Amino acid sequence: MTTKKQAPVSHQILIQITDTHLMADPDSTFLNINPEESFHAVMQDIGLRYPDLDALVHTGDLAQEADPMTYSRYLTFMRLQQINFFHIPGNHDDLQRFPFKQALPIPTVIDLDPWYIVLLNSAVAGQVDGWIDQDQLQCLEPILEQYQDKYVILACHHHPIDMKSYWIDQHKLKNSPEILQVIAPYKNIKAVICGHVHQDSVNVWNNIQFLSTPSTCVQFKPRQTQFTLDQEAPGYRCLHLNSDGTFSTQIHRLVGPQSSIDQAISGY
Ligand SMILES: [Zn+2]
C-alpha cells in the first residue's frame, strides 16, 4: 500500500494595525495620549514578536490631522522598517492626500498565495460613517471570481457588523447588507478585518469571522450607549494564515506604563 505524502502545512503572518490617529506635529497629544509614541511602541513590539512577518496592513484613520506632513512622516517611518506594508483610509483621513497604493476604485490585493487580502476603501469624504461604492463593488466581483480556489480576507476601515455600542453603530459601514450579499456565495472568504471601533471583537456570519482590532492609541469601551474611553492598552492583531486555509488570530497589547486616560473626555 502506498500512502501519499501530505505537503506540510506552512503559514504566513499578516499583521493588522489600525487607527494610529497621527498628528501633524509628532509631539502633540490626542485624547491625552501621544499617538506617535504609542504607534512606535506598537511597531517595536511587532518587530520583536514577528521579525519575519509577511505583510502588515493599516486599516485606516492613519491621521487624526490629515496634513501632508502626517502622511509623509508615516511613509518615511514605515519604509525604514523594511516590511511589506499597506494602508487603507478611514473617516479621519483626507482622501485627496492619502497615499493610495493604486488608483481607486480598483482594490489593492495583497498576494500571500494561497491567501489574498483585498483592501476596500469605506471612507467617504466629509462623513464619519462608511460606504463602499458601486465602482469598487464592481471591481470586487471579478477579484472574488479569480481567487475562488484560494483563501480570501477582506479589509476595510468601518465595521460591517454591529458592535452593540449605540453611538458607534451609527457610524458603521452603512451599505454592509449589499457587501454581505456580494460575498455570501464565496465560501473561501475566511475573514473580514476592520478598524474604526478601537476595540477587539469577533463576530461570525456565514462562517466568515468579522474581526475588529484595538487602536494603536486610545481604546473605546465595548457595549456603551455613549462615547466612553477604555483603560485598555494600545494594541494590534496578528493573523497566522495556514496553507490549508485555516487561520488563527490574536491581539497583542502593550505592557508597561501608559499615559492615564481621562474618563471625562466625551468625544473626539
Ligand atoms: Zn479611529
Image (cartoon, grey):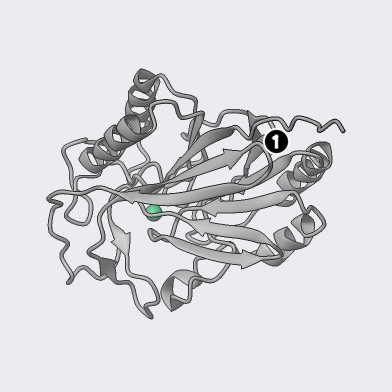
Residue 209 screen position, x and y as percent? 60, 59
Q: In this view, does 267 lie above or below 144?
A: below
Instruction: Please name whichever residue, 220 or 62, is drawn nearer the observer in this view of the structure.
Output: 220
Of all residues, the one furthest to the front in this rendering is 1
Q: Is residue 246 above or below residue 226?
A: above
Examine the image and state in which quarter residue 22 appears: top left
Of all residues, the one furthest to the right in this rendering is 1
Instruction: Please name whichever residue, 257 or 267, is drawn nearer the observer in this view of the structure.
Output: 257
Instruction: Please name whichever residue, 155 or 23, is drawn nearer the observer in this view of the structure.
Output: 155
Question: Which residue is found at the position 16% from the left and 55% from the top?
Answer: 32
Question: Which residue is found at the position 48% from the left and 76% from the top?
Answer: 164
The residue carrying mark 1 has its beta carbon less than 8 Å from ligand 1? no
Q: In this view, does 216 lie above or below 25?
A: below
Residue 103 screen position, x and y as percent? 64, 30
Look at the image and tell me whether residue 124 can be seen. no
The amino acid type of the residue labelled 1 equals: Ile
Question: Which residue is found at the position 26% from the left and 35% from the top?
Answer: 40
Q: Mark 1 points at which residue?
A: 106
Q: What element carries label 1?
A: loop
Look at the image and tell me whether residue 190 can be seen. yes
